[in-house]
Amino acid sequence: MKCREAIQEISNFLDGDLDGGLRKELERHFAECDECNLVVVQTRKMIEIFIQAEPVDLPLEVRSRLHGTLRKRLNPSA
């Protein structure tokens, strides 16, 4: 398995949404590839941090700009 293929499956790997064969192939790749293993470890840590984090209220100005940008991207013809 190539690194690009492994990285594309990290989300499914961490969520447990893979068949046994692909999961074993990824586990083998992550055990042998320090760079990809680092991505998996860091992604797990980031998920843990976000899960434990408290929601933060955005300032009104930031919220307004964010909503405006999202509206433009979701409805570019408007």
Image (cartoon, rainbow, N blue to C red):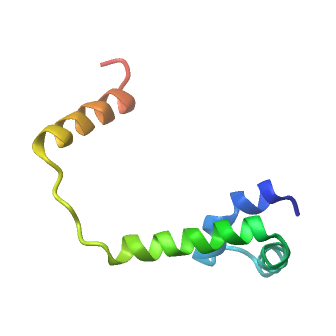
Quarter occupied by the C terminus: top left
Relative placement, left or right, of 12 versus 55 is right
Q: Position of residue 41 (x, y in %)?
A: 62, 74
Q: Residue furthest right?
A: 1
Q: Quadrant of residue 22?
A: bottom right
Nearest to the observer: residue 26 or residue 19? 26
Residue located at (78% from left, 74% from top):
30
Callout count: 0
Q: Position of residue 45 (x, y in %)?
A: 51, 75
Residue located at (47% from left, 71% from top):
47
Relative placement, left or right, of 46 versus 76 is right
Quarter occupied by the N terminus: bottom right
Nearest to the observer: residue 32 or residue 66? 32
Residue 63 lies, with reference to residue 25, above or below; the image says above
Q: Quadrant of residue 8?
A: bottom right
Relative placement, left or right, of 65 versus 70 is left
Residue 24 lies, with reference to residue 56, above or below; the image says below
Nearest to the observer: residue 17 or residue 26? 26
Q: Position of residue 14 (x, y in %)?
A: 61, 74
